[in-house]
Image (cartoon, rainbow, N blue to C red):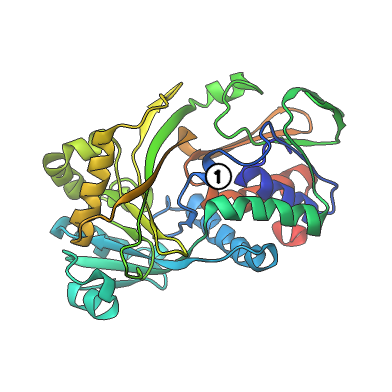
């Protein structure tokens, strides 16, 4: 395996379950990329209808299986999608008529306040409650998952090491040759080191985003929160015909938020602090600097959705991930090699299921047999 982000680790697990000896090669000594800079929010509800939604459901199940043995805490469960406009309520009502709304509930403002005191005063016309999601602390979960793979599944990690060429059975690295019958390449946001022509043919670019950690508000959120802006960004909602009216209203009322690709996710860590974001800017080489305007717009949406002022910002960072029109792809650039990329920011939500599909493709094993 090349790459020790969540996608690479998921492939290591699937291959180990299939009875393979696994080596994971990564250029960094420890995880520093998108896999530890995100919300740790395994999102099912709102994912693109079809394969992505199904992969998210399967990946959530694998997270539940590995969390305990790997010492990974599940900090939150579920999702509260807070709609504050009449058009948002219409989108949520339409979503409830789809198969993706299984076990979800649509709540009124009175029901929200009665059930969740922490959201009293939130300007809600309707709220979608989903019981399906789980949330982990990414910066803790990824290294613990890697350590568990090494201890429980005998996965070997070669890091830091750069892969220079792949000519199976040899993988030439900056620290010597690794012999392998197959190789799965999960390059994350590296679009140029390995098989750049394949990646370019898929129209992959990079997406950068800003995220914040806020001090504890002194209350416990019922679940991760999302808002109206997410209903026009997450494809499970946005692809519904009813979303067009909401998109038009948002374009009138929040053009700067849309210009910066902002939608709201709020998750709560074990210490009570909140991880809040995010924005989306696209390009071949994203700049390293965070903009105050973008931060202010994120915090503005936080206040608009919750009805409360944002607590003080105690940490800031930027993330970068590969992005394309498709949510992910798997390619075979040469015999025995699979190039796998998540190009939608859904790695934490779909990686385990994608990995099972890849290993089945390589070794002809079904998901159940590999498990």
Q: Which residue is mark 1?
A: 35
Q: Secondary structure at mark 1?
A: helix
Q: Is residue 348 left or right of residue 290?
A: right
How far across and how far down the image is residue 30, in percent? 65, 41
The one nearer the camera, 344 or 292, is: 292
- Residue 207, percent across and down? 43, 32
Q: Quadrant of residue 33?
A: top right
Q: Position of residue 363 (x, y in %)?
A: 79, 46
Question: Horizontal placement of 97 versus 355: left or right?
Answer: left
Task: Single out the residue that lies furthest toward the bottom.
Answer: 114
Q: Who is closer to the viewer here, 205 or 286?
A: 286
| Residue at image coords 26%, 62% | 82
Question: How many tags in the picture?
Answer: 1
Tell me where residue 307 appears, x and y as whole percent. 18, 61
Quadrant of the image for the N terminus? Answer: top right
Classify residue 241 as left or right of residue 145. Answer: left
Q: Along the horizontal axis of the image, is 13 left or right of 348? A: right
Please identify the quadrant where the C terminus is shown: bottom right
Instruction: Residue at the far left: name it.
Output: 252
**Relative to 328, residue 13 above or below:** below
Nearest to the observer: residue 156 or residue 254: 156
* Rendered position, 170 above or below 76: above
- Residue that appears at 31% across and 63% down: 217
The residue depicted at 58 percent of the width and 60 percent of the height is: 58
Q: Residues within 10 Å of mark 1 (few under 14, many from 20)?
A: many
């Amino acid at each position: 395996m090349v790459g020790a982000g969540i996608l690479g680790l998921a492939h290591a697990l699937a291959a180990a379950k299939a009875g393979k000896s696994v080596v994971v090669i990564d250029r960094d000594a420890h995880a520093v990329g998108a896999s530890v800079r995100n919300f740790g929010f395994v999102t099912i509800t709102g994912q693109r209808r079809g394969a992505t939604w199904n992969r998210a459901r399967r990946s959530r199940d694998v997270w539940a299986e590995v969390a305990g043995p790997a010492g990974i805490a599940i900090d939150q469960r579920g999702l509260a999608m807070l709609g504050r406009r009449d058009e948002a309520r219409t989108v949520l009502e339409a979503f409830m008529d789809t198969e993706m709304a299984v076990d979800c509930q649509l709540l009124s403002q009175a029901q929200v306040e009665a059930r969740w005191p922490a959201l009293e005063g939130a300007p809600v016309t309707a709220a979608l409650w989903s019981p399906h999601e789980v949330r982990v602390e990414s910066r803790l979960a990824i290294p613990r998952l890697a350590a568990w793979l090494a201890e429980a599944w005998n996965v070997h990690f070669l890091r830091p090491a750069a892969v220079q060429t792949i000519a199976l059975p040899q993988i030439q690295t900056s620290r010597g040759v690794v012999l392998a019958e197959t190789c799965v390449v999960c390059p994350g946001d590296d679009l140029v080191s390995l098989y750049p022509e394949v990646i370019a043919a898929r129209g992959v670019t990079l997406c950068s985003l800003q995220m914040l950690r806020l001090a504890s508000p002194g209350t416990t959120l019922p679940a991760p929160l999302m808002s109206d802006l997410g209903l026009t960004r997450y494809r499970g909602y946005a692809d519904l015909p009813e979303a067009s009216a909401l998109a038009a209203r948002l374009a009138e009322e929040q053009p700067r938020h849309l210009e910066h690709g902002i939608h709201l996710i709020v998750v709560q860590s074990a210490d009570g602090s909140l991880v809040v974001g995010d924005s989306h800017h696209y390009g071949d080489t994203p700049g390293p600097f965070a903009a105050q305007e973008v931060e202010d717009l994120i915090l503005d949406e936080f206040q608009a959705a919750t009805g409360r002022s944002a607590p003080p910002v105690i940490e800031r960072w930027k993330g970068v991930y590969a992005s394309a029109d498709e949510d992910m792809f798997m390619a075979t650039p040469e015999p025995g090699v699979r190039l796998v990329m998540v190009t939608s920011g859904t790695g934490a939500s779909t990686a385990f299921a994608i990995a099972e599909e890849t290993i089945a493709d390589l070794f002809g094993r079904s998901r159940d047999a590999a498990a």
